[in-house]
């Protein structure tokens, strides 16, 4: 297949593009600068110069592709509308990237028992996202509804992704952010009691599900992407051990917000986001199940 990938220079899109190439597909990647275009070309990806705001370009590239992966921005409605327009009536796949922060809680380091399944987005579901994530959920549903327009549209809703990216971007968000703060300060910090839990998935397993979704997912489907879960206190303890630091310590929510900002501190590092995936329906068999084991191994090597 010839696959058009937005976010091809990023952590998720770059890893998906790399696996597509290794699986024998042709890849076109949206890129904003000529320097990054040259790097994509060096990796075997055909660069397409432009941005998510170039509506005509996105329509044209989607229309010319056999499939589209949108991994650039989970919240850019204009880009998604353009990609859907380009694919309308073709029956070709659009795999759109969302994130499980749509079910995150303002729990400030406390545990929450609720676990979400893909039924939350089913017709007739009474579930409603928090106000901050309402626009993202509406965009996810727009993608799913594109199945009625002749697009084999799929939403993959990633949980906390760990592991080193295989494209131009090496690091994800949550674990590297914690590690960076720890290296600067000498202390790993979690928020509150750190009992908040996120579902997790290794980047290689995630990329494998993207490829399976391109060929096997039903039109209008939605899949959480996860294989395991971890509390942030455990993540921070593993980081402290791997980095050779003392015990992880707590930050109160106000201090965390002052350092990391409101969104990152409360809805990424101090929230709960516990989900379960139906990816097995696509024949998905993830190989990695422990973010803590990965931290101990990979960050320990950097000491």
Image (spheres, rainbow, N blue to C red):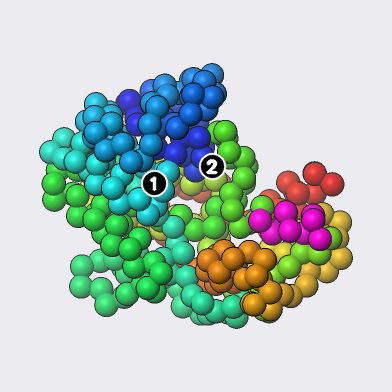
> Mark 2 or mark 1, which is nearer the start of the sequence?
2
Q: Nearer the viewer, residue 239 or 134?
A: 134
Q: Residue tagged by mark 1?
A: 283
Q: Which residue is drawn at 48% across and 29% down?
A: 33
Q: Is residue 104 above or below residue 153?
A: below
Q: Could you say whether the residue bearing mark 2 is in a helix, strand or loop?
A: helix
Q: Can residue 31 be seen in this view?
A: yes
Q: What stretch is highlighted in magenta?
A: 177-185
Residue at 80% from the left image edge and 44% from the top image edge: 302
Label 1, secondary structure: give it. Answer: loop
Q: In this view, does 24 lie above or below 144?
A: above
Q: Which of 151 and 131 is in front in this view?
A: 131
Q: Which of marks 1 and 2 is in front?
A: 2
Q: Distance between the residues labelled 1 and 2?
A: 24 Å
Question: Image quadrant of residue 135?
Answer: bottom left
What secondary structure is the magenta-colored segment mainly?
helix
Residue lying at 57% horizontally and 64% vertically, measured from the top left: 264
Measured from the top left, where is residue 23 in percent x and y? 44, 27
Vertical relation: 223 (above or below) 153: below
Left or right: residue 74 versus residue 236 is: left
Q: Does the magenta stretch include residue 181?
A: yes
Q: Quick check: can you spot residue 197?
A: no
Quarter of the image that includes the N terminus? top left
- Which percent across, then down, holds residue 36? 52, 27
Observer-nearest of 214 and 101: 101
Q: In this view, does 129 lie to the left or right of 32?
A: left
Q: Position of residue 81 (x, y in %)?
A: 24, 46
Q: Check disc 2 and report the residue beneath it.
A: 11
């Amino acid at each position: 297949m010839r696959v058009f990938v937005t976010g091809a220079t990023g952590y998720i899109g770059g890893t998906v593009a790399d696996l597509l190439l290794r699986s024998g597909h042709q890849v076109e990647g949206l890129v904003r600068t000529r320097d990054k275009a040259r790097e994509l070309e060096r990796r075997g990806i055909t660069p397409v110069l432009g941005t998510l705001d170039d509506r005509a370009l996105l329509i044209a590239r989607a229309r010319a592709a056999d499939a589209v992966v949108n991994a650039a921005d989970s919240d850019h409605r204009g880009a998604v509308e353009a990609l859907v327009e380009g694919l309308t009536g073709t029956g070709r796949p659009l795999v759109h990237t969302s994130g499980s922060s749509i079910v995150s809680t303002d729990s400030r380091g406390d545990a929450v028992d609720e676990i979400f399944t893909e039924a939350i987005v089913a017709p007739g579901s009474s579930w409603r996202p928090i106000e901050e994530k309402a626009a993202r959920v509406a965009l996810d549903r727009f993608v799913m509804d594109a199945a009625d327009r002749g697009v084999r549209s799929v939403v993959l809703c990633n949980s906390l992704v760990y592991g080193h990216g295989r494209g131009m971007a090496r690091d994800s968000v949550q674990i590297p952010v914690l590690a960076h703060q720890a290296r600067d300060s000498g202390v790993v910090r979690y928020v509150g009691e750190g009992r908040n839990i996120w579902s997790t998935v290794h980047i290689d397993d995630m990329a494998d599900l993207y490829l399976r979704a391109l060929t096997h997912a039903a039109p209008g489907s939605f899949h959480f992407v996860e294989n395991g879960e971890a509390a942030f206190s455990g993540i921070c303890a593993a980081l402290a051990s791997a980095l050779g630091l003392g015990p992880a310590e707590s930050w109160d929510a106000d201090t965390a917000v002052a350092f990391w900002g409101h969104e990152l501190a409360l809805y990424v590092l101090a929230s709960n986001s516990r989900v379960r995936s139906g990816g097995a329906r696509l024949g998905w068999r993830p190989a990695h199940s422990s973010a803590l084991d990965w931290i101990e191994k990979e960050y320990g090597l950097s000491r």
